[in-house]
Amino acid sequence: MLRVGVIMGGVSSEYEVSLKTGREMLKALDPAKYTAVPVHITSRKELLEGAAGLDFALLALHGAYGEDGTVQGALETLGIPYSGSGVLASSLCMDKGLAKTVIRSKSIPTPDWLCWDSMDDYAPEAVQRLGYPVMVKPNSGGSSIGMTKVNHPQELRAAVEKAFASADGGSVLIEHYIPGQEITCSILGGEMLPVIGIQSLGADWFDYEAKYEQGGAEEQIIRLPDALQEQVQKAALTCYRALKCAVYARVDMLLKDGIPYVLEVNTLPGMTATSLLPQSAEAAGIDFSSLLDEIITGSLRERGGLQGASGEGARTVADTGVKPQGQVKEAQQADHTHQTPQARTVEYGGVRL
Ligand SMILES: Nc1ncnc2c1ncn2[C@@H]1O[C@H](COP(=O)(O)OP(=O)(O)O)[C@@H](O)[C@H]1O
Ligand SMILES: [Mg+2]
């Protein structure tokens, strides 16, 4: 049986989130198929010891050393196949500013931004040109940590200092704030799963509490008008490919005036059973356990651990029983067991989901 190590913990600010993801994955891995081994790490070195003897590393990590390509590099060196995107895509997507440069080069809209390496770069007049409000965030952060929405110039300095304080030596992004409808597009095996709309309750953006506290946000599968759906799908898949993502990823966007603005691409998005990508997969008829199967199989193929190189001969989403976009709503109506209370299908009216 395949010995699957669930790598969790890590050294980033997203340690707690990672532990939760890891525990859920361990619960959901099919014992008939895998020998699941928890690999709880709190330092970089522990990965090298913990990974010994594994056939596969299922990454439940987030943030620095996990989502940023370094763990992927270590596992490549050890010759252990791992889940998700490779080294390049992982580190590229971790650098929000650089990823935005690639995204913009493909003519996919992303909010205007500035990227500062230290307080020496502090230039309030450049932010004035960008236009308030702005979001100030660590360039390589996650889980909305160290992030502030700045409405007035006088709040800028404190927000930038706060972002640097949690940036761990990295840079800070100042991004034009888009007052739009937040959506997230999950991609599995190069195909887009049903779109989820996010409505933060009590905050005007998806902050840490909204993300992780019960009732902090309303997340629903949404059905966009066909033309917009097509545009969103094109944006999501273009980013996924341009950034060299593999197996699965989640693209965060904001919709405003019918334009999808890409915020970032997550190469190791939250993976508790109620996280966004699993919810999206569920709406397509893929339960959490099957989703992990898909990820493991797809990753083994990607890493050359299964018959057939990546791409050629690879299973498509169609082979896995995932319903094509157009049938999602019908499929949900036919099978209500796939609807969680948080994942109701609603029409997108441009106002509220
Ligand atoms: N430019 C922006 N305009 C409006 N809201 C934003 C913007 N940037 C971030 N946000 C809000 O902050 C959240 C987190 O931002 P994001 O860039 O996705 O970072 P993280 O890596 O922390 O998820 C988003 O989900 C969104 O609610
Ligand atoms: Mg995000």
Image: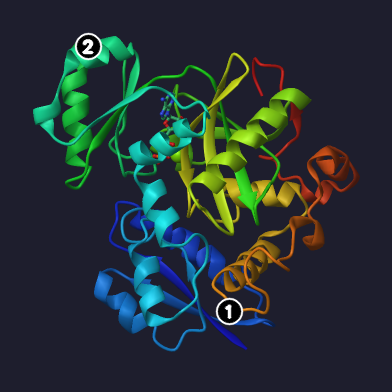
* Residue found farthest to the right: 334
In the image, is residue 13 above or below residue 345? below
Question: In the image, which disc is placed on residue 82?
Answer: none
What residue do we see at 32% from left, 40% from top? 145
What residue do we see at 34% from left, 44% from top? 95
**Quadrant housing the N terminus:** bottom right
In the image, is residue 99 above or below residue 46? above
Quadrant of the picture in which ligand 1 is shown: top left
For label 2, the SS is helix
* Residue found farthest to the left: 120
Q: Residues within 10 Å of mark 2 (few under 14, many from 20)?
A: some
Question: If you read the primary sequence from the N terminus, does the residue marked by circle 1 or circle 2 appear first?
Answer: 2
Residue 125, by quadrant, is top left
Horizontal and vertical percent position of residue 171: 22, 39
Nearer the observer, disc 1 or disc 2?
1
Give the residue type that dot 2 points to: Pro
| Colour basis | rainbow
Horizontal and vertical percent position of residue 74: 34, 73
In the image, is residue 159 above or below residue 65? above
For label 1, the SS is loop
Give the residue type that dot 1 points to: Gly
For label 1, being within 8 Å of ligand 1 is answered no
Query: Could you say which is closer to the camera, residue 135 or residue 17?
Result: 135
208 on left or right of 273: left
Residue 302, by quadrant, is bottom right
Horizontal and vertical percent position of residue 85: 50, 59
Q: How many numbered marks does the figure carry?
A: 2
Circle 1 residue: 305
Circle 2 residue: 153
